[in-house]
Every structure is written in C-alpha cells, then in structure tokens.
Amino acid sequence: MSDKTVPDKPPADTLVDPGQQARWFNRVREAHQAETAEDYVELIADLIEAQGEARVVDLANRFGVSHATVNKVIVRLNREGLVSNQPYRSLFLTESGKGLARRCKERHRVVLDFLLALGIAPATAEADAEGVEHHVSEETLAAFRHFIVKQNQK
Amino acid sequence: MSDKTVPDKPPADTLVDPGQQARWFNRVREAHQAETAEDYVELIADLIEAQGEARVVDLANRFGVSHATVNKVIVRLNREGLVSNQPYRSLFLTESGKGLARRCKERHRVVLDFLLALGIAPATAEADAEGVEHHVSEETLAAFRHFIVKQNQK
DNA sequence: TTCAAATTGTTGCCAAGGCTAAACATTGTT
DNA sequence: AACAATGTTTAGCCTTGGCAACAATTTGAA
Ligand SMILES: [Mn+2]
Ligand SMILES: [Mn+2]
Ligand SMILES: [Mn+2]
Ligand SMILES: [Mn+2]
C-alpha cells in the first residue's frame, strides 16, 4: 500500500480567470450606475412626447417613488448635463439628454420586441425588458434584431 | 374663419398605465436588492466546490472590489441567514444559502446557454448573463430553455 | 381677488455598497 | 520561538437613492 500522501485535491472544477470575472462584475456595476439616468431621460422624453410636458409628480407616479426622490435624482441629472429645469417648472432634456433618451428608447424597443417575438406574454415582456435593457451588449442587441426580423418573415 | 380655440392637444401617444409602469420599476428595484446576495452565494458555492473553501480575498478578487467591501456584505448576508462564518475563518453557506445558490446557478446557466445558442460570442455572453440573469422572469426562463432545446435539435 | 389645493422644493434621516487606512489574527519560514 | 507575510476585521468616509415631514410656490375655483 502506497503511503504517498496524495494532497487530497478537491474536485477542482475549472473556475474562470479571476481578472476576467472581475471585469464582468465591473461592467454590471457600471450598468447599474447608468441605469437611473437612462430610465429617467427615457421617461421624460416619453412624457414630453405624449403629454407635452414632464412633471415631477408624473415621474414619481410612474416610477413608484416619492417626489422627494425624483427631485434628488433630477438635481444629479442636472449636474450631469442631461436635464435642464427651472424651479417650479416642468422638466426638459438637454441635447445630450435627448440623445441618450433616443438611444435608450431604441434599445428598450429592441429588447421588448425580442421578448415578444420569443413568445413571452406582453405584460411579462414589458416587466423583464425594464431590467434586462441595461445589461445587453451591442452584440446581443444585434442578435436580438436579427431574431426579430427572422421571426417576422415566418 | 372659425375662432374655435382648438386646445392644441399634443400628439398624445398612448402611454402605459402609471400603476402598471410603477409595478415594473418596483420589480427592477427588488431585483437589484436581491442581486448582491445572489452573486455572493453563487460565487461562494463555486469556490467551495472548486477549491474546497471560499475566502474573503478570493471574493474580493473575483468581484473586483476591496476586501473591506466584501466583509461588509458578508456581515449583511450573515444577518440575513445566508452565510455562516467564524472570525478569521473561511466562509460557509447556510442551508438557505445553499438553496439560493443552487437556484441562482441554474438560472445563470440557462441565461448563458441561451445567449450562446443565439450565437453570441462566449466572452460577451458571459458578461451579459451576469447582469441579465437577475431580471428574467420564470416565464422568460422557460422560453429560454425551450429555445436551447430546439437549437440543439437542429 | 382670494384662498385652498396641487405641485415643487428642502431638510434630515436611513441602508447599501463603494473606498482607504489601520488594527488584528493566522500562517509559514527561518 | 520569532517574525514577516498573508489574510481578516474594523473604522471612518463617500455617493446613490429610498423615505417622511415641512416649507414654498403655483394654479384653479370661488
Ligand atoms: Mn429600465
Ligand atoms: Mn440590473
Ligand atoms: Mn449576476
Ligand atoms: Mn451569476
């Protein structure tokens, strides 16, 4: 009997490279930092288009948060040059904000249409899209677009 | 000439119901609150399986954050009954933590395999999956599974 | 015009997750 | 046994985005 002390190596399933994994998680954290700004400019653009103006009260209602929270976020978006506003007046997007809104609305539409093309029920698709949209790369978005087209051809 | 003052109604594109929209955003916020816990238990389970133990230093490395941050999160997960640990010893999952880890790993796998089946490059798929996984409903997950099976049959 | 209701803004609180720096404990080598 | 290296915890700070309560302004109806 060999008393060669095998070091009792555990399964040692191959784990991915730590640096690579860290980059993935970093990307998710960056997405989450951008997320509030993206949802706000998108909704502000939608409200202006549909109702002529975007008011703090409407944002609070549609986000399901207090108006104090909306106000605080608006201060930040103003500081970051996405939103312009005067006290007690409704909200506007800067050119930069309009650009971001346009890109986000397009991305949101692709994600939603993709889920619908996949056969997901509209209510579920809308709910999922609201979160998923912030985490899809350009490459995945392209694949989504391709799938939508293929599905429409059938 | 009619001086009937038409109220100059703007486009009035139909917006979704505010309460419904608020529920969607609420769901996203809930997903984000659960997210850290999910990624931690998943990685702790992976590390224990592959290396026999999960240490603070490894988590910090793989998440790309400082070890102090990891420590603070661990305190919370401990408080929430997902992780059990002794001072200066490596980390363990409670039964509850193990269950959550198992479900999260399965969900992560489905999302990843779906993106791969869609033709996304592995590196991109892994990165996107890390964020997307937290926002897919059971219904969407089922559709993903179905798509994977269909794709494998071709 | 007046005044109440609606809307917007401010203040102060909280928790989560980031960070650095410093203290503390364990481990491995002389 | 000593001690340096490694790993862990704690402390204190920051930003974001939640909240309630209160203050201020605008708006609409008498
Ligand atoms: Mn969104
Ligand atoms: Mn997210
Ligand atoms: Mn994740
Ligand atoms: Mn995961």
Image: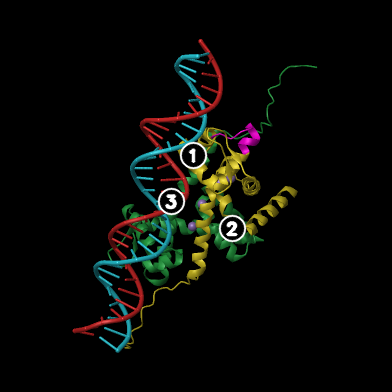
Chain colours: A green, B yellow, C red, D cyan
**Residue A53 location (% of width, % of height):** 36, 69
- Position of B92 with respect to D3 (left or right) is right
- Whether pointer 2 and pointer 3 mark residues with C-beta atoms closer than 8 Å, the reply is no
Tell me the element at label 3: helix
**Residue B40 location (% of width, % of height):** 56, 43
**Disc 1 sits on a residue from what chain?**
B
Quarter where residue A98 is shown: bottom left
Q: Main secondary structure of the magenta part?
A: helix
Front disc: 3 or 1: 1
- Whether pointer 1 and pointer 2 mark residues with C-beta atoms closer than 8 Å, the reply is no
Label 2, label 3: how many angstroms apart (C-alpha)?
A: 22 Å
Q: Residue at x 50, y 61 (%)?
A: B26
- Disc number at residue A34? 3
Front disc: 1 or 2: 1
For the residue with label 1, is its CB less than 8 Å from the closest atom of ligand 3? no
In the image, ligand 4 is in what quadrant?
Answer: top right
- Position of A115 with respect to A45 (left or right) is right
The quadrant of the picture occupied by the N terminus of chain B is bottom left
Tell me the element at label 1: helix
Q: Earlier in the sequence, mark 2 or mark 3?
A: 3
The residue carrying mark 2 is: A114
State the residue lying farthest toward the right.
A1
B9 vs A92: above or below? below
Q: Mark 2: which amino acid?
A: Phe
The residue carrying mark 1 is: B71
